[in-house]
Image (tube, grey):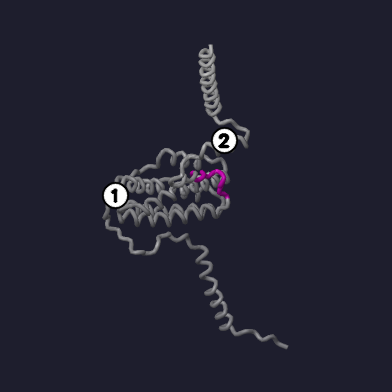
């Protein structure tokens, strides 16, 4: 029996269909990380409203972030042997170019002077990466330094977004928030973030109207822990001595009167 072969036109059609179905997945996988610009939410960008010192400081810090994270991301593409770290560095560098453009536009609009060089700490971090002995050591420094920096500025962005009176600063803060959240997620996707080395959040402030812990509670806690409360023993001793002195004076006066 002869095996019937499929017509050539059918084979070609199937091949083209298969290529068409697989193309989107391959293209999406190879595409760079998109620039995380938030959707238009009606925020204006007219430069109206008072600009505070905190607003100016925020705009300068966004500029400083780009001045060291762009070269750091470029360095990751040159020094790292981990394809994932290379991809992270490329995405962060490219996205900071876009964010820096937004920041410089707002700074020009509001008449704010921007630096052109990283600050001292940022230059030290770049030198650490440059002098890393091995690609693996570079990866750890790159990921940890950038993750710590993004974690530090992240709450500051929220404060500016919530409190600024200037519409352009408000919009920039919202855009910056999207970039920083994306970068933190990218850095954490490396799987090598040293979370234990990150700074801890400050302790919450006491609730309004709540005064210091009562002395009786302090004494109870100290007694349970076998500790002495500094200054308390001296106070008790002075009170006892004063009471003894009063008793002694009263007793002496009674003796003299009886005589």
Quarter containing the N terminus: bottom right
Relative height, residue 163 to residue 13 (above, below): above
In this orientation, which residue lies closer to the viewer: 22 or 177?
A: 177
Badge 1: few (under 14), some or many (20 or more) residues near its Cα, within 10 Å? Answer: some
- The answer to which of marks 1 and 2 sits earlier in the sequence is 1
Estimate the x, y position of residue 120 in percent, counting from the top left: 42, 38
Estimate the x, y position of residue 104 in percent, counting from the top left: 33, 51
Is residue 195 covered in magenta? yes
In this orientation, which residue lies closer to the viewer: 34 or 226?
A: 226
Is residue 227 covered in magenta? no
Taking the image as shown, residue 242 lies to the left or right of residue 6, namely left
Magenta span of residues? 192-202
Q: Residue at x 33, y 61 (%)?
A: 43
- SS of the residue under disc 1: loop
Relative height, residue 44 to residue 62 (above, below): below
Q: Give the prevailing secondary structure in the magenta stretch.
A: loop
User: Visible in this render: residue 197?
Assistant: yes
Estimate the x, y position of residue 214 in percent, counting from the top left: 51, 39
Q: CA distance from mark 1 to mark 2?
A: 50 Å
Task: Count the labels in the image.
Answer: 2
In this orientation, which residue lies closer to the viewer: 109 or 129?
A: 109
Relative height, residue 33 to residue 198 (above, below): below
Q: Which mark is residue 51?
A: 1
Residue on which disc 2 sits: 219
Badge 2: few (under 14), some or many (20 or more) residues near its Cα, within 10 Å? Answer: some
């Amino acid at each position: 029996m002869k095996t019937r072969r499929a017509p050539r036109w059918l084979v070609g059609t199937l091949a083209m269909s298969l290529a068409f179905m697989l193309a989107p997945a391959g293209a999406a996988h190879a595409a760079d990380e998109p620039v995380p610009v938030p959707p238009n939410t009606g925020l204006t960008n007219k430069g109206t409203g008072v600009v505070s010192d905190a607003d100016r400081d925020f705009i300068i810090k966004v500029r400083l972030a780009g001045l060291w994270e762009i070269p750091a991301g470029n360095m990751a593409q040159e020094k790292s042997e981990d394809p994932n770290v290379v991809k992270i560095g490329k995405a962060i560098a490219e996205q900071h170019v876009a964010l820096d453009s937004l920041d410089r536009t707002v700074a020009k609009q509001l008449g704010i002077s921007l630096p052109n060089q990283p600050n001292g700490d940022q230059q030290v971090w770049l030198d650490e990466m440059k002098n890393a002995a091995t690609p693996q050591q570079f990866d750890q420094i790159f990921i940890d330094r950038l993750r710590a920096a993004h974690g530090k500025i992240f709450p500051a962005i929220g404060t500016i977004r919530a409190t600024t009176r200037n519409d352009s600063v408000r919009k920039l803060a919202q855009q910056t928030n999207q970039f920083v959240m994306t970068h933190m997620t990218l850095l954490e996707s490396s799987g090598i973030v040293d979370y234990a080395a990150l700074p801890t959040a400050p302790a919450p402030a006491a609730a309004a109207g709540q005064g210091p812990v009562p002395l009786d509670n302090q004494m109870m806690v100290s007694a349970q822990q076998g500790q002495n409360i500094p200054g308390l023993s001296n106070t008790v001793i002075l009170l006892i001595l004063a009471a003894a002195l009063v008793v002694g004076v009263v007793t002496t006066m009674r003796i003299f009167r009886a005589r």
